[in-house]
Image: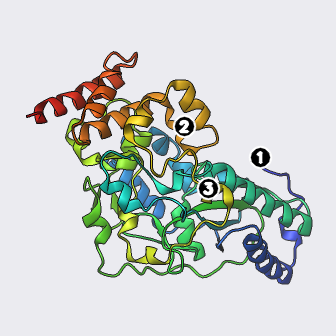
Amino acid sequence: MNARTHVSADRIPAPELERLASDIAAWARELGFSGVGIADLDLGEAPQRLRAWLAQGRHGGMTWMERHAGLRADPSTLVPGAASVITARIDYWPAAARAAHEVLADAERAYVSRYALGRDYHKVVRGKLQALADRITAAVGPFGYRVFSDSAPVMEVAYAARSGVGWRGKHTLALARDAGSMFFLGEIVTDLPLPTTPSASEHCGTCRACLDACPTGAIVAPYELDARRCISYLTIEHEGAIPEPLRPLLGNRIYGCDDCQLVCPWNRYARSAADPDLAKVRHGLDDATLVDLFAWSRADFDTRMAGSAIRRIGYERWLRNIAVALGNAPTSVAVVAALASRADDPSQVVREHVGWALRRHAASAP
């Protein structure tokens, strides 16, 4: 969203800003957000931790994170005169979807991260944030702001913690006592000097369930993630070939991974999505077979994934990921035939992963 030209943020008396902050929380809930908080721009030690993480190369091929590190540390570069960050969360757990553990246990079916089963969250969250910004404009007049939802270099989890929306869990995702981690975050960076809400304290304690559950050992220590081993990174952000040693560990996960969240005790409080765009499962992706999805043409992919977060990985990565999952599936006539049908795929990346999968089945044949 574009920044709006403001009149003068300091024209609003402090008591009115207090009332406005209260109104913002009420309006956010009316729009479907389940939590909202406000922070100033101080991120504490988060920028230093980010720089250390980048220096270790744990961002893998996400080079934009290194390029935009300075922007992440200072939102005023995104919104001139920025003084506050409004953080809001919205629940996404699709209650109508087939149980996650059942799909993960069925190696012939494709596991898609639960957040991606509905409509593209970027559009849903930004739309609601814009509606919230419009309510603020109606109340105080034009002001400077921009809205974000995983769409710009904003340290979302850090601001969620600073504003009390949720603390940074050991799996590095935001956690809330009343909502677990199955929610999206969005921000309005504004020049309004709004009063801040209390920060969130951590409640992970001695639990290490997420570390122990990670299939690839990507959570290398509490609060430390090596993206290069993370299945979400490998199936979504990573271009080219997936490292061979990691392929068997992907199992049937073709887009993202929820394992660290599924075992988190706080997710017993995860809330079902209230927004129908997030609650509705699209194209049966909660219970689809790998063979059926591998048969999709490029036109099928483009049509069915329109309006989905999955579309951003493109058709080549979609086939690459499914080829790996098929290589991990039980050997059957249908699985081998599906792989053989793409042995001469135009994409070298797809061909290489298909060849690897076929060799695995050949090796397991009696």
- Name which residue lies at 84% across and 66% down: 136
**What x and y, as percent, mark residue 203?**
41, 81
Q: Is residue 90 above or below residue 286?
A: below
Q: Which residue is mark 2?
A: 312
Give the CA separation, mark 2 to mark 3: 19 Å
- Amino acid carrying label 3: it is Lys
- Amino acid type at mark 1: Asn
Q: Nearer the viewer, mark 2 or mark 1?
A: 2
Q: Is residue 81 visible?
A: no
Residue on which disc 1 sits:
2
Q: Quadrant of the C terminus?
A: top left
Q: Classify mark 1: helix, strand or loop.
A: loop
Q: Nearer the viewer, residue 237 or 48?
A: 237
Residue annotated with mark 3: 280
The spot of residue 84 in percent (x, y) is 69, 67
Residue drawn at x 73%, y 73% as measured from the top left? 29
Q: Name the residue located 15 percent from the left edge and 29 percent from the top edge.
A: 362
At x 43% / y 79%, what residue is drawn? 202
The percent coordinates of residue 27 (x first, y second) are: 79, 72
Please say which color scheme the image uses.
rainbow
Q: SS of the residue at dot 3?
A: loop
Q: Nearer the viewer, residue 209 or 325?
A: 325
- Badge 2 element: helix
Which comes before the other along the chain, label 1 or label 3?
A: 1
Location of residue 82 (image quadrant): bottom right
Report the Cα–Cα distance between label 2 and label 1: 22 Å
Furthest-left residue in this view: 366
Residue 14 lies left or right of residue 38; in this view the side is right
Around disc 2, counting alpha carbons within 10 Å, would you say few (fewer than 14), some (14 to 19), or many (20 or more)? some
Looking at the picture, which amino acid does disc 2 mark? Arg
Q: Earlier in the sequence, mark 2 or mark 3?
A: 3
Left or right: residue 195 versus residue 158 is right
